[in-house]
Image: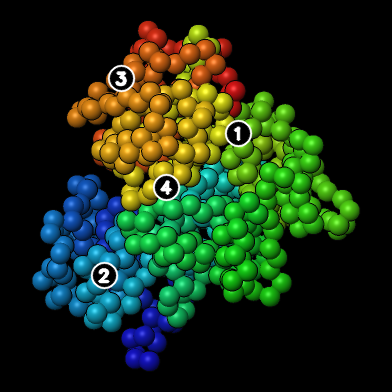
């Protein structure tokens, strides 16, 4: 090992000597700025490289003392980056692993970290390091992280949700109040970069992969690479590897993982649980893992009826609840606390959110369904659907979801740039289904046109469901804007805001 490699391997604490280390940070989004800010605080020399810099963040970089290279063409390393001669690269999740800058970095033998590895090494900043509960999966991550953190907080632990949920882990580990446990949402992009370097290996207290379906294949290059990245969430787990027993891929991940001796495999599912499982018996959500007599007994957590009252009874949400309960129970949260949290918990906006009910037709915003797997879960919750679908498909095949749900569709309304793939899938698997297309170039036109078409075809008993199965950035800034504009269009279609009774009803009705 070289002297530099030994130095990097030894940087495992906030109190390690980071002074003078030349670090290039790729990217200046929320994560990239948190990385730069942290490294400057540690005394490193920091150069940020980005194709386009947010004006405010660029100004703040100057204030904190980092340098910035803004270059729209990053097909080769800028001269200033080569002259900087970085000793370490910290890459933001948005940079594809095969980006020319990363290819250049690997060719010159420079070590690459992600923000998660950096945060793991620095987790002792405010004293005793917090435990990490790690959550990944194709869908349901954010809801599960929020549920788990809420359960831990109600159980008396100092806990915080962070990571891909929007709060950088580096901000959480630098919070002066400190935490007992961090619930960390990890994307496949972030997991791609973990556990590659000596001294930076993650070891979560408990970990979960909720489900796996093809997604982000354009980033990873293949389904196998995507799944391999997700599987890293279980590496070195200390207490509980929580997996979805209805998704064999997640069970295989647990079987193949190198974990700490004593770590248990805990499954969740919507059927009757076996010993060491979480599941449902006669409408009761049960824990058969964290009790002494788990072979003959179970602990009641809540009921489907209670979840229905809280708007949480859609099957994929129940699965998320079981996973979160398993993670919280692994940390010692009492069953009564979990029940109380679930009675008060509400889903975020744009997650199977009921907008209104008019003339027997429900209008539901699930803009967060940004891939076919998420849309599949949403479609399963309704019997007769006018489906608003489309956007950026990210290289994912849509034939399976169209074929699976063709029988429950009243009609489909196609939006977005990747309509040809959807059009072809419907022609193959639902040739007689009424199909409409929104050919709009302006963001503000898309949802009014889609809603008008849906209003013409929907009948009493139908659900008009915005579950696009695709990313939003072709026509919207993000899925939240897509959902917000859908809600605005629905309310304008009916001449104003929904009445109080309609607006307050739960999204699984």
Q: Is the C terminus in the top left, top right, bottom left or bottom right quadrant? A: top right
- What residue is disc 3 on? 448
Indicate whether 429 appears above or below 277.
above
- Gap in Å between the C-alphas at discs 1 and 3? 27 Å
Mark in front: 4 vs 3: 3
Image spot of residue 207 (x, y percent): 59, 60
Name the quadrant containing residue 208.
bottom right
Who comes first in sequence, dot 1 or dot 2? Answer: 2
Who comes first in sequence, dot 4 or dot 1? Answer: 4
Specify whether 270 is left or right of 403: right
Q: Which residue is drawn at 47% across and 56% down?
A: 186
Q: Circle 3 sits in a helix, a strand or a loop, which is it?
A: helix
Q: How crowded is mark 4: few (under 14 residues within 10 Å), some or many (20 or more)?
A: few
Q: Residue at x 37, y 54 (%)?
A: 216
Q: Residue at x 48, y 52 (%)?
A: 213
In the rendered structure, find residue 314 and report the number of the disc placed on it.
1
- What residue is disc 4 on? 166
Q: Which residue is drawn at 18% across and 52% down?
A: 52
- What residue is disc 2 on? 102
Q: Dots 2 and 4: beta carbons under 8 Å?
A: no
Q: Is the N terminus in the top left, top right, bottom left or bottom right quadrant? A: bottom left
- Gap in Å between the C-alphas at discs 1 and 2? 42 Å
- Gap in Å between the C-alphas at discs 3 and 2? 42 Å
**Front one among 306 and 122:** 306
Q: Circle 1 sits in a helix, a strand or a loop, which is it?
A: loop
- Gap in Å between the C-alphas at discs 4 and 3? 30 Å
- How many numbered discs sit on the rendered protein? 4
Image spot of residue 14 (x, y percent): 45, 71
Q: Residues within 10 Å of mark 2 (few under 14, many from 20)?
A: many
Mark in front: 3 vs 2: 3
Image spot of residue 90 (x, y percent): 32, 67
């Amino acid at each position: 090992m070289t002297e530099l490699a030994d130095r990097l391997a030894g940087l495992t604490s906030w109190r390690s000597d980071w002074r003078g280390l030349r670090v290039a940070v790729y990217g200046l989004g929320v994560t990239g700025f948190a990385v730069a800010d942290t490294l400057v605080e540690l005394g490193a020399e920091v150069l940020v490289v980005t194709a386009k810099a947010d004006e405010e963040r660029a100004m703040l970089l100057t204030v904190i003392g980092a340098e910035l290279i803004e270059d729209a063409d990053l097909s080769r390393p800028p001269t200033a980056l080569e002259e900087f001669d970085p000793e370490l690269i910290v890459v933001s999740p948005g940079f594809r692993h095969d980006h020319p800058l990363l290819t250049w970095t690997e060719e010159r033998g420079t070590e690459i970290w992600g923000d998660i590895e950096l945060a793991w090494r620095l987790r002792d900043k405010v004293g005793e390091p917090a435990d990490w509960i790690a959550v990944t999966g194709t869908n349901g991550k954010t809801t599960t992280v929020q549920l788990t953190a809420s359960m831990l907080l109600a159980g008396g632990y100092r806990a915080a949700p962070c990571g891909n949920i929007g709060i950088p882990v580096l901000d959480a580990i630098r919070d002066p109040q400190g935490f007992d446990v961090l619930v960390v949402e990890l994307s496949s992009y972030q997991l791609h970069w973990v556990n590659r370097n000596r001294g930076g290996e993650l070891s979560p207290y408990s970990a979960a992969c909720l489900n796996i379906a093809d997604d982000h294949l354009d980033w990873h290059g293949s389904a196998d690479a995507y799944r391999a990245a997700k599987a890293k969430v279980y590496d070195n787990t200390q207490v509980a590897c929580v997996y979805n027993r209805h998704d064999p891929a997640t069970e295989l991940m647990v079987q193949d993982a190198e974990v700490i001796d004593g770590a248990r495999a805990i499954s969740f599912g919507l059927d009757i649980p076996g010993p060491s499982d979480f599941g449902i018996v006669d409408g009761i959500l049960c824990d058969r893992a964290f009790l002494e007599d788990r072979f003959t007994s179970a602990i009641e957590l809540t009921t489907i009826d209670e979840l229905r009252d809280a708007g949480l009874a859609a099957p994929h949400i129940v699965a998320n609840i079981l996973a979160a309960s398993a993670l919280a129970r692994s940390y010692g949260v009492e069953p009564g606390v979990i029940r109380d949290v679930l009675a008060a918990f509400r889903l975020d906006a744009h997650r199977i959110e009921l907008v209104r009910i008019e003339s027997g037709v429900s209008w539901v915003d699930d803009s967060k369904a940004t891939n076919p797997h998420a849309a599949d879960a949403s479609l399963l919750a309704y019997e007769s659907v006018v489906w608003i679908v489309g956007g950026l498909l990210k290289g994912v095949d849509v034939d399976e979801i169209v074929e699976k749900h063709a029988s429950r569709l009243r009609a489909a309304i196609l939006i977005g740039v990747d309509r040809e793939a959807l059009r072809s899938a419907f022609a193959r698997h639902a040739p007689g289904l009424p199909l409409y297309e929104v050919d709009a170039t302006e963001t503000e036109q898309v949802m009014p046109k889609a809603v008008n078409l849906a209003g013409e075809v929907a009948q009493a008993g139908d659900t008009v469901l915005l579950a696009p199965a695709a990313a939003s950035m072709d026509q919207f800034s993000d899925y939240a804007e897509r959902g917000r504009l859908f809600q605005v269009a629905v309310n304008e279609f009916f001449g104003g805001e929904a009445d109080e009774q309609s607006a307050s009803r739960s999204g699984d009705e």
